[in-house]
Image (tube, grey):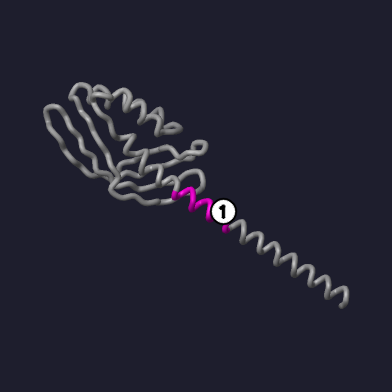
Amino acid sequence: MSTRTRLVAVIALAVAVAAAAFVGLQARGASATADARNDALAAAKTRVPELLSYENATLEDDLATALDQTTGAFTDDYRTILTDVVTPTATERRISTSASVSAAGVVSGDRDEVVVLLFLTQSTTAAKAGTTVAGSRVEVTMARDGDTWKIAGLKPL
């Protein structure tokens, strides 16, 4: 076998190894993204009802639990809503509310941030008004916070 033939064979082998490594890395990246989307979706299905549900009798504890579901700038924004709107209204009208996820799906996302669409059913009970049930849709941005996924944004649609 000539030197030129050996050189061509070595180059061809190097190109094949590089291509295989590239494909392997792409597959691993795609798998990690799919895992992130699945994990974030599961977290959203659990965390959003905890964010939006509270009992008048345990309001302070329930709202602290709600804040624990959030991360980033959304935590401060949501704290303001809870302090300025939810707490005084729920206390005055003795309101309790319970949210549940009817359907959910991933809109977009990568390994660190995933946007999901949730269809919610929310039951609200007020002392004088009785109980009402309403449906809604929300787009939720889930962000990785250490080893967990938390709510980084919530937009009603």
Q: Splitting the image into 4 quarters, where does residue 18 fall?
A: bottom right
Q: At 27% across and 24% down in the image, what residue appears?
A: 58
Secondary structure mostly seen in magenta is helix
Q: Splitting the image into 4 quarters, where does residue 55 fall?
A: top left
Report which residue position mark 1 lands on.
29
Tell me where residue 31 appears, x and y as whole percent.
53, 55
Q: Horizontal placement of 39 versus 63: left or right? A: right
Chain part drawn in magenta: 27-38
**Number of numbered discs visible in the structure rendering:** 1
Quadrant placement of the C terminus:
top left
Q: Which of 83/59 is in front?
A: 59
29 falls in the magenta region = yes
Q: Which of 119/76 is in front?
A: 119
Quadrant placement of the N terminus:
bottom right
Q: At 32% across and 44% down in the image, what residue appears?
A: 138
Q: Splitting the image into 4 quarters, where does residue 48 fall?
A: top left
Label 1 is placed on what type of residue?
Gly
3 falls in the magenta region = no
Q: Residues within 10 Å of mark 1 (few under 14, many from 20)?
A: some
Q: At 40% across and 27% down in the image, what residue appears?
A: 76
Q: At 46% across and 32% down in the image, what residue appears?
A: 72
Tell me where residue 4 appears, x and y as whole percent.
85, 74
Tell me where residue 120 appears, x and y as whole percent.
27, 44
- In this rendering, the answer to whether 142 lies above or below 79 is below
SS at mark 1 in the image: helix
Q: Horizontal placement of 58 versus 41: left or right? A: left
Tell me where residue 134 appears, x and y as whole percent.
20, 42
